[in-house]
Amino acid sequence: MLEGSYILAMQQIIKEANDSGNELSIGLESRDWSDVTGSYSVHAAFVCLANDMVTLVKLNGDSIDVPLAKLSEADRDWIMAQTPRRQ
């Protein structure tokens, strides 16, 4: 699975940068994400959307898989604007 390999590679890069004390720029936009209730939020970078599951990576390298329907409307709109439409 390509997404899984990509996430693992990103996690390793982030971990190594954190361990060495270096500042890391991975070219992904990190932002605040919240759930539909507004009671949970996390600062993370969007990695992918697959099968209505959103993969986010926190700055510490931990990945989070969240059902698209559980994210706020604003976050769902942001994801739809970032992902290519399939014909």
Image: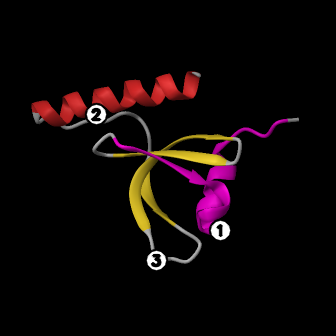
| Residue type, label 3 | Ser
Percent coordinates x, y for residue 70 in the rendering: 61, 64
Percent coordinates x, y for residue 14 in the rendering: 28, 33
As drawn, is 44 to the left or to the right of 83?
left
As measured in the structure, the alpha-carbon distance from the residue carrying label 1 to the one carrying label 3 is: 14 Å
Q: Look at 63% across and 51% down and name the residue there.
A: 79
| Residue type, label 1 | Glu
As drawn, is 10 to the left or to the right of 20?
right
Q: Residues within 10 Å of mark 1 (few under 14, many from 20)?
A: some
| Residue type, label 2 | Ile
Q: Are marks 1 and 2 in contact (CB under 8 Å)?
A: no
Q: Is residue 5 above or below residue 27?
A: above
Percent coordinates x, y for residue 85 in the rendering: 78, 40
Q: Which residue is mark 1?
A: 73
As measured in the structure, the alpha-carbon distance from the residue carrying label 2 to the one carrying label 3 is: 27 Å
**Is residue 77 shown to the viewer in this render?**
no
Which numbered disc, 1 or 3, marks the residue that appears first in the sequence? Answer: 3
Q: Look at 36% across and 33% down and name the residue there.
A: 26
As measured in the structure, the alpha-carbon distance from the residue carrying label 1 to the one carrying label 2 is: 29 Å
Q: Which residue is mark 2?
A: 14
Tell me where the magenta segment starts and ends, as one range. Answer: 62-86
Label of residue 39 in the image: 3
Q: Look at 71% across and 42% down and name the residue there.
A: 51
